[in-house]
Amino acid sequence: MWYEHQPGQYEDFHATALYCPKCRDAMPVRSRLLLVLPDGELHEYLCQVCSTSVGTKTVKQQPDGRLIVM
């Protein structure tokens, strides 16, 4: 049926603009890797104009992924 979930569809979104409290408007953002966690990665969104932190996102690892620590 048309409403069934198809694997791989809409699993990961990337923000291009978010509201910045300092600029007081929706502004373009860039993503910065903050932490590598056992279950994924933590990213921070920064306003491209004033570099204010406007949000975070956790990207989960695939179940078959491996983390190698040296």
Image (cartoon, grey):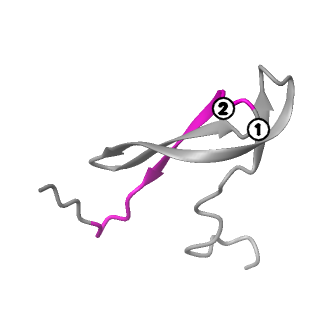
Q: Regarding mark 1 in the picture, which secondary structure is present there?
A: strand
Find disc 2 in the rendering and name its residue: 51
58 in the magenta segment: yes
Residue drawn where x is 70% and y is 49% of the image: 15
**Extent of the magenta region:** 50-65
The amino acid type of the residue labelled 2 equals Ser
Is disc 2 surrounded by few (<14), some (14 to 19) or many (20+) residues within 10 Å? few
Q: Quadrant of residue 47?
A: top right
Residue 37 located left or right of residue 58:
left
Residue 24 located left or right of residue 60:
right
Residue drawn where x is 38% and y is 59% of the image: 61
Q: Quadrant of residue 12?
A: bottom right
The residue sitting at the bottom extreme is 1
Identify the image quadrant of the C terminus.
Answer: bottom left
The residue sitting at the right extreme is 25
Find disc 1 in the rendering and name its residue: 18
Q: Position of residue 23 (x, y in %)?
A: 83, 24
Residue drawn where x is 63% and y is 71% of the image: 9
Residue drawn where x is 77% and y is 20% of the image: 22
Give the Cα separation between the discs numbered 1 and 2: 12 Å
Q: Is residue 48 above or below residue 40?
A: above
Q: Position of residue 13 (x, y in %)?
A: 65, 57
